[in-house]
Structure formats: structure tokens, C-alpha cells
Amino acid sequence: MTQLIRTWLLTCAALAALCLGPRTAHAELGVIATTPELASLAAAVGGARVHVQALALPTQDPHWVDARPSLALQLSRAQLLLSVGADLEVGWLPTLLVGSRNGRVQRGSAGFLEAAGLVELLERPTGKLDRSQGDIHPSGNPHFLLDPRRAERVAVGIGKRLAQLDPEGRASYLENTQRFVQALRQARHRWEERLSQARGREVITFHRSLSYLADWLGLQVVDYLEPRPGVPATPRHVAQLIARCKQRPVSALLQESWQPSNTAELFAAQTGVPLVILPGAPDFPGGESYVGYLERVVELLGAALVKGAQ
Ligand SMILES: [Zn+2]
């Protein structure tokens, strides 16, 4: 009988350890980021005091994420929600916020931080916007996390918000932020050097998702496969682009891995312009850092835009 009780107690202890896991050791702050980029920044700044999850997968177009109940459940436990903003998640995040029934992370509360408020946005529409034309960037371009200078500002903002929510960790967040900023700046200078010969190169991009990358590196985006952000390319528009590039070739057609590549492949085959498919986001579930992600982006750009120039 004693043996039975002992076995039972051991089983309970093992189950408790499984359920609680090592996370309870620090009473981690639960952080949910809408995209893997934001999640990687939060993980760098939060360190061991936070547990970070991303709602969108690295393979998903962040404009169109399925608002599944499992994501609402994830959000229901969060203490901080990091959103990109500028309408990037407008099609799915509001549904998840309602479904989460979590008052701590609703818009306007301390547990909700919108990164777009921390940076200067490009392509802000001027004048009256006609939404009937399907433009999915009505508040300016939301793809700013491909610019390490803006990512730095967002990381600093996340660190401040974490310190506000978890004052005991203030020194830790500050130290992590400083370490991250220093590493990012060092990497950025190296990347700028690597791609210095690419400055001024003309490129076409699939979606207006590489405007900040182009702004940072001095690339000239001369056109897009999509006639408007979020509006699929029409045969007429693609034919015009092909004709244009036969007359005046561009250095590359750039797109991200979460966009369909059939139109881009057709364009590349017709024009001879190299198609460069960039990773759309860090492999955050696989543990990739923000710096590691941009490293991959820079390497692909370097191979396409610099190697050929030498
Ligand atoms: Zn977009």
C-alpha cells in the first residue's frame, strides 16, 4: 500500500513538473507578437523573463492570417500583445482580440503595444483614399521591420513597455536592449558595406513590402507586380512590365517567400531578369534571431545585386 502511495505521489510530481515546466522558475511574462519579426525582437529584449510566441507563421502573408480559435486561446493568456499596426493585421487581429476575452491586451491598455507608433511610416497616403480600389496599405506602409534602423526603435520601445509591465526586470530589459542594439548596429554597418555597390540599382518588387529595405539600402523600386498593394497582377499589367523590362532591364525582381511565385517566374522567364525570393520573416519557431534573419536577406541580395557587378 505504501509503495502504491509513493508511486502515486511520484506520478503526481512528475505530472506537475511537466505541466509547470521550467517557465515558472522566473514567473515569465507572456508575450504574444502578431508576426515572427516582432517576436524575434521581443525575445532579444525580454530574454529569460519573457515567454514569446508569434501568431503568424514565417510562411504566412501577415496581411492574411486565419483567425483560428487556437490563436485566440494563445492570446487569452498573454500579458503583452505586440502588433505591427498600420492596418497590417486589420483583417484578423480584431477577431482574435474579441475571441481572447483578455482585457489586459486590448487596444489602449498597457498590455497592447503597436510598433507603427514607434517609427516613421513611408507611403502615407495623402488626400482622400479610395478603399474601393482594394489598397491594403491605407494607413501607410506597414512593412517597416525590414529596416534595421526602424527595428532598433521598435526593440527599444518593447524594452520600455516590458519594464513598465514587469518593473522588477527593468535592469535586465535595459541591459538586453543595449546588447541587442549594439549587435544590430554592428551587423547593420557590415551589411551596408556588403551591399554598398547595390546602391542605385533598379528593382521591381512583387508587393510594396520591400520599400523600407530599399529605402535603407538605396535601391530604386521602379514598379510592382501588383498594380496596387494587395491587388493581384492582371495579365495586362504583367505584359506592360515585361515590355518595359525588355526595353530597359532592371537588376532583379524581388519578392518574399510567402507570396505566390508563378507570375514572378513567368516574368523572369520572359525578361531574363533574375527572380530573388527573400525569406518573408525569421524562422522564429526554429529559434532564428532578427539579426540572423536579416543576415539571410542581405546574403541573397548580395549574391543577386553585387556579385554580378564585380
Ligand atoms: Zn503589405
Image (tube, helix red, strand yellow):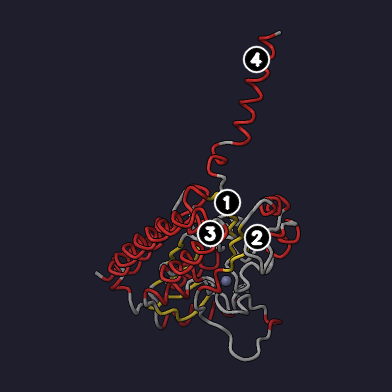
Query: Residues under labels 2 and 4: Cα distance?
Result: 48 Å
Q: Residues within 10 Å of mark 3 (few under 14, many from 20)?
A: many
User: Relative to 302, does residue 17 appear above or below in the rendering?
Assistant: above
Q: Which residue is mark 1?
A: 29
Residue type, label 4? Arg
Q: Are marks 3 and 4 in contact (CB under 8 Å)?
A: no
- Tag 4 or tag 3, which sits nearer the N-term? 4
Residue type, label 3? Leu
Q: Secondary structure at mark 4?
A: helix
Q: Residue furthest left?
A: 310
Query: Residues under labels 3 and 1: Cα distance?
Result: 9 Å
Residue type, label 1? Leu
Q: Secondary structure at mark 2?
A: loop
Query: Residues under labels 3 and 2: Cα distance?
Result: 26 Å
Q: Which residue is mark 3?
A: 162
Could you say which is closer to the camera, residue 150 or residue 68? 150
Give x and y (percent) for residue 148: 41, 67
Q: Residue at x 68, y 86 (%)?
A: 130
Location of the C terminus (image quadrant): bottom left
Give x and y (percent) for residue 61: 59, 62
Q: Which residue is mark 4?
A: 6
Q: Residue at x 33, y 62 (%)?
A: 187
- Tag 2 or tag 3, which sits nearer the N-term? 2
Q: Which residue is mark 2?
A: 65
